[in-house]
């Protein structure tokens, strides 16, 4: 017996899955702002591997996320220059 499900249910399921995925990959705004400050204060445009600030934080090279929080930053040998911003203190989940 073949059941034919309405098309809207597949579209609805896809939409729900996209929302769930987006909510898990997003970080709090204060954490994103701290990372952007780091980028700006350390000459991010000149890094060996730069970040696309318009892209999701999860795609930024050297940033590790867990449960929607920044838990690690590894920018070793990435040509950073400048002073670390005070806003890094907002990254309270660093391990």
Image (cartoon, rainbow, N blue to C red):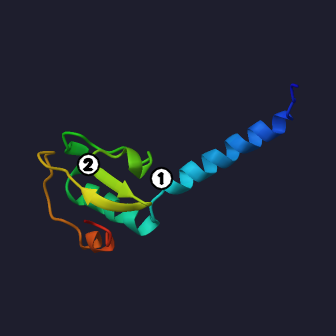
**Image quarter for residue 88?**
bottom left
Find the residue positioned furthest to the front: 1
Q: CA distance from mark 1 to mark 2?
A: 15 Å
Residue 36 located left or right of residue 25: left
Residue displayed at 38% across by 44% down: 59
Residue displayed at 36% across by 56% down: 65
**Image quarter for residue 31?**
bottom left
**Image quarter for residue 10?**
top right
Find numbered disc 2 in the image and state the secondary structure of the residue it sits on. loop
Nearest the eye: 45 or 14 = 14
Residue displayed at 19% across by 56% down: 42
> Which numbered marker is on residue 71?
none
Residue 48 sits above or below residue 53 on the image: above
Residue displayed at 24% across by 49% down: 44
Nearest the eye: 22 or 77 = 22
Within 10 Å of disc 1 (Cα), the crowding (few <14, some 14-19, many 20+) is some
Q: Position of residue 52 (x, y in %)?
A: 37, 44
Find numbered disc 1 in the image and state the secondary structure of the residue it sits on. helix
Q: Position of residue 46 (x, y in %)?
A: 20, 43
Marks 1 and 2 close (CB-CB < 8 Å): no
> Which numbered marker is on residue 62?
2
Residue 88 sits above or below residue 45 on the image: below
Provide the residue designation for mark 1.
Answer: 25
User: Which is nearer the N-term, disc 1 or disc 2?
Assistant: 1
Q: Position of residue 68 (x, y in %)?
A: 44, 60
């Amino acid at each position: 017996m073949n059941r034919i499900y309405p098309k809207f249910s597949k579209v609805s399921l896809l939409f729900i899955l996209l929302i769930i995925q987006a909510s898990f990959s997003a970080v709090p705004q204060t954490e994103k702002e701290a990372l952007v400050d780091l980028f700006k204060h350390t000459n991010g445009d000149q890094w060996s591997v730069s970040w696309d600030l318009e892209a999701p934080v999860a795609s930024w090279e050297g940033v590790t996320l867990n449960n929607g929080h920044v838990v690690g930053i590894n920018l070793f040998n990435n040509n950073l220059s400048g002073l670390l911003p005070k806003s890094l203190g907002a990254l309270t989940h660093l391990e």
